[in-house]
Image (cartoon, rainbow, N blue to C red):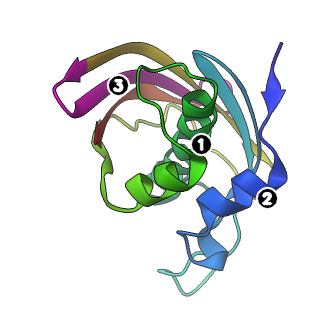
Amino acid sequence: MKTRVPKERLESVLELYKPDCRYLVEATVKYPKAEGRFKLGDTYYTTRKLEHMTTIEAQLCLNQLCYSAFGEWLLEGRFDEAMTFEEYLELMKENMFIIDSNIRFRKPIPTNGDIHGKIEVMKVKRHGNLYLAFLDYDLEQGKSKGKLELALKR
């Protein structure tokens, strides 16, 4: 059964972002998968609203979904690392990285409505105090699909 990420934890994760870059509206998780609903506003780097998602917004959406999902999974005890949510939020600021992303668009993704995305953890490896996670992602039912590699340094 999917679990909805509580609003207060979602807001805690999104505090790291400027208000107009908080795209994740809601998320559900069921390890090893997570789904998110995103709402894009005006971009801060263009003089007019774009009608399609760019790699910049896609990366921010995927970051936010990953941060939210991994926070829930750590609290569920999915990894052999015990920590509080507050400790996780501190780690998230400087010790969690997307080390590789393969964002490709097969079709344009319109920004005039909700955008749905999914991630799925395919593999997690531990090397000392470094965790590596390999994920697949999908935005808008295949309009953008690819792979992500994440690192968490403890």
Q: How far apart are the alpha carbons under marks 3 and 1? A: 14 Å
Q: Residues within 10 Å of mark 2 (few under 14, many from 20)?
A: some
Nearer to us: label 2 or label 3: 3
Range of residues picked out in magenta: 126-142
Circle 2 residue: 112
The percent coordinates of residue 108 (x first, y second) are 59, 43
Question: Height in image: 134 above or below 113?
Answer: above
Circle 1 residue: 65
Q: Amino acid at mark 2?
A: Asn
**Residue 49 is at least partly visible in this image:** no
Please name the residue shown 54% across and 31% down the image: 74
Please name the residue shown 42% across and 26% down the image: 146
Tell me the quarter of the picture where residue 147 sits.
top left
Quadrant including the C terminus: top left
Sooner in the amino-acid sequence: mark 3 or mark 1: 1
- Mark seen at residue 25: none
Q: How far apart are the alpha carbons under marks 1 and 2? A: 20 Å
The percent coordinates of residue 15 (x first, y second) are 61, 69
Sooner in the amino-acid sequence: mark 2 or mark 3: 2
Tell me the quarter of the picture where residue 151 sits.
top left
Dot 2 and dot 3 residues touching (CB under 8 Å) = no
- Mark seen at residue 133: 3
Q: Is residue 105 left or right of residue 24?
A: left
Magenta stretch secondary structure, dominant: strand
Secondary structure of the residue carrying tag 2 is: loop
**Residue 128 is at least partly visible in this image:** yes
Please name the residue shown 55% across and 45% down the image: 84
Question: Height in image: 96 above or below 132?
Answer: below
